[in-house]
Amino acid sequence: MSIKENLHRIKSLLPKEVTLIVVTKTQPIEKLQEVYNAGHKIFGENKVQELVDKYEVLPKDIQWHLIGHLQSNKVKYIAPFVSLIHSVDSLKLLQEINKQAEKNNRIINCLLQIYIAKEETKFGLDFQEAEELIASTELKVLKNIKIVGFMGMATNTENKTQISSEFQLLQHFYEKYRQLETFNLKLEILSMGMSSDYGLAIENGSTMIRVGSSIFGQRD
Ligand SMILES: *Cc1c(COP(=O)(O)O)cnc(C)c1O
């Protein structure tokens, strides 16, 4: 099937409260242009350099999401335009995002990436670290960031029960913090689910899915 057909098939099946992020990492500009021409304008990249390069050549009404691990020294390159950072995993990173956002005279929306997988390789805060960050006095002085939700990745396994239970843990954590509202924290986004598991993620409360290979085909 074509990119356009894949995109429309996936979108037609999504509940209306779920936002699709088309993950364009490793894809050439022509393919991003195809997605854009099909009417979709929310893209996710996992590397800063690739995100910046693509931003520069594509139409300016695209919303760019950074979904991969972010190093503090690279925040400055995306701060002028990024619309959501999914991968905040430390107070230090959040402080740098705040600083760069201030320089650009804007507020940058962020998700805390929470570690839910039973794997060594995934980045993120555990539940306790996230609670500590949310309660910290250091957070309360950051005027140019807003924490708008959580992101999580399930274990890469065929075991649906395990994937579901990992997503469910994060959903419960999200629900617990939905009641909290401060000037720089109000949770409205739960970013969970990729090509292999977005159905299970939506069953467990996801409001934002990040899908690449189901749209473009398997990456090399
Ligand atoms: C690559 C990636 C995705 C999309 O993966 P697919 O399996 O291609 O859908 C989603 N989230 C993150 C953080 C990624 O790096």
Image (tube, helix red, strand yellow):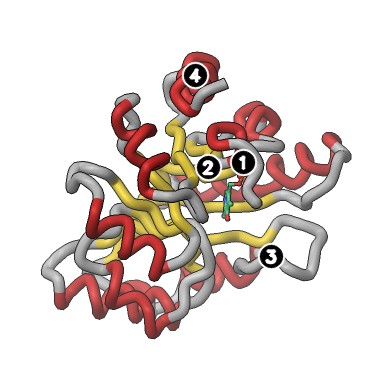
C-beta proximity under 8 Å, tags 1 and 2: yes
Asked if residue 64 lies left or right of residue 207, the reply is: left
Q: Circle 3 sits on which residue?
A: 122
Q: Residues within 10 Å of mark 1 (few under 14, many from 20)?
A: many
In the rendered image, which quarter contains the N terminus? top right
Q: Residue at x 39, y 74 (%)?
A: 94
Residue nearest the observer in this picture, 69 or 204: 69
Q: Circle 2 sits on which residue?
A: 210
- Mark before the other along the chain sequence, 3 or 2: 3
Q: Is mark 2 within 8 Å of ligand 1?
A: yes
C-beta proximity under 8 Å, tags 4 and 2: no
Q: Is mark 3 within 8 Å of ligand 1?
A: no
Q: Position of residue 77 (x, y in %)?
A: 29, 73
Against 159, residue 105 (above or below) is below
Q: Marks 4 and 2, Cα distance to the nearest angstrom? A: 17 Å
Question: What's under tag 3, amino acid-wise?
Answer: Lys
* Residue 5, numbered circle: 4
- Mark before the other along the chain sequence, 3 or 1: 3
Question: What's under tag 1, amino acid-wise?
Answer: Met
Q: Residue at x 34, y 80 (%)?
A: 96
Against 108, residue 202 (above or below) is above
